Amino acid sequence: METNQPLTFGPVNSRRFGISLGIDLSPSHKQCNFDCLYCELEKQKTISIQTNSVPVEQYIVAIKEALIKYPETEVITITANGEPTMYPFLDQLVDQLNIIKGEKKLLILSNASLIWDTNIASILHKIDIVKLSLDCATKECFSKLDRLDSSLDSQKIIDGIIGFSKSYTKELVIEVLFVDTLNNKQSEIEKIYAILKEIHPSRVDIGTIDRPPAYDVKPISYEELNNIAYQFVGLNVTIAHRHKIKLEKSLDIEEILNLLDKRPQTKEDLENLLDEKSLRLFHQLLDNKQVTIRNQAGVEFYGKRKS
């Protein structure tokens, strides 16, 4: 299908991935095998096969032109109005992008619905950063929140993510989007955490609704997201939310170290939580090498140095 729709967008300065140039693999309309309640796109019945697809050649021409126009691009992001792994020529597209991207990284944003398919998994192995969604751990939650196409099986998706994580050696990011009353129940959080521990991704991004959703569902608070992050022990967790909190009092050095020991913090976390006095003490700890810095899929995490 030839199209006059824009095939690329941006670049945008992503806090987590750098300067990102996007590719839309369904530019004319939504084509997805999920109908997530929180989706910012319009409501639409799920499909199992993408029926309107733009030829690879058109994408390569558009990307080459965009890279000349925006040489500062750091990441080329494969996404879609829907699910990008449904694009039938994804393998050929990824091969071509890997030829022309140079030092830039290739990223895909996927709902993980087809990760169990060995052909899709093999394609994703050729991508530098794979970001997969995992909003639910149970069939009931998948049915209510992500609203899968009838061709899909939620347990196959979970097993597929776990299997992929065992063989994928690059940067794997898992995103969990929490919706009030649906997947923020304690039992669901604990089951999601159990799966995440088995996957052990480079990074876990947690967030909630911050744009008008397709259906009448509600976000959870930043405080609740923060509490969930502390339950995901042993994982590198970032919190995406427009409304932040400040701690009620300044922290001393021992309290800051205890905070970093409980959960590695990003720069954004610390700037949101700590007042000026506490931030000065943090930088003192950093200068004294009492704090470690680890880069996980493009995000720096600060933790307490172990003795």
Image: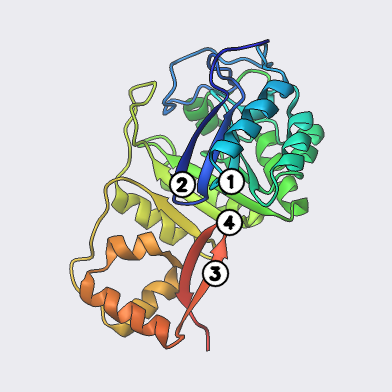
Q: Which residue is drawn at 65% across and 40% down?
A: 158
- Residue mark closest to the camera, 4 vs 2: 2
Residue farthest along the left direction in this orientation: 248
Upstream in the sequence, badge 3 or badge 1? 1
Cα separation between marks 3 and 1: 20 Å
Within 10 Å of disc 2 (Cα), the crowding (few <14, some 14-19, many 20+) is: few
Q: In the figure, 31 relative to 12: above or below?
A: above
SS class, disc 4: loop
Q: Residue at x 53, y 40 (%)?
A: 70
**Residue linked to disc 3:** 294
**Residue linked to disc 4:** 297
Indicate the position of residue 97 as horizontal and vertical percent values.
Answer: 72, 37
At label 2, the amino acid type is: Ser
Cα separation between marks 3 and 4: 10 Å
Cα separation between marks 4 and 2: 12 Å
Residue farthest along the front direction in this orientation: 68
Q: Nearer the viewer, residue 86 or 114?
A: 86
Indicate the position of residue 179 as horizontal and vertical percent values.
Answer: 39, 36
At label 1, the amino acid type is: Val
Cα separation between marks 2 and 3: 19 Å
Indicate the position of residue 206 as horizontal and vertical percent values.
Answer: 45, 48
Answer with the quarter of the image where residue 73 lies. top right
SS class, disc 2: strand
**Residue linked to disc 1:** 75
Upstream in the sequence, badge 4 or badge 2? 2
Upstream in the sequence, badge 2 or badge 3? 2
Q: In the figure, 267 relative to 222: above or below?
A: below
Q: How many numbered marks, from 0 up?
A: 4
Answer with the quarter of the image where residue 155 lies. top right
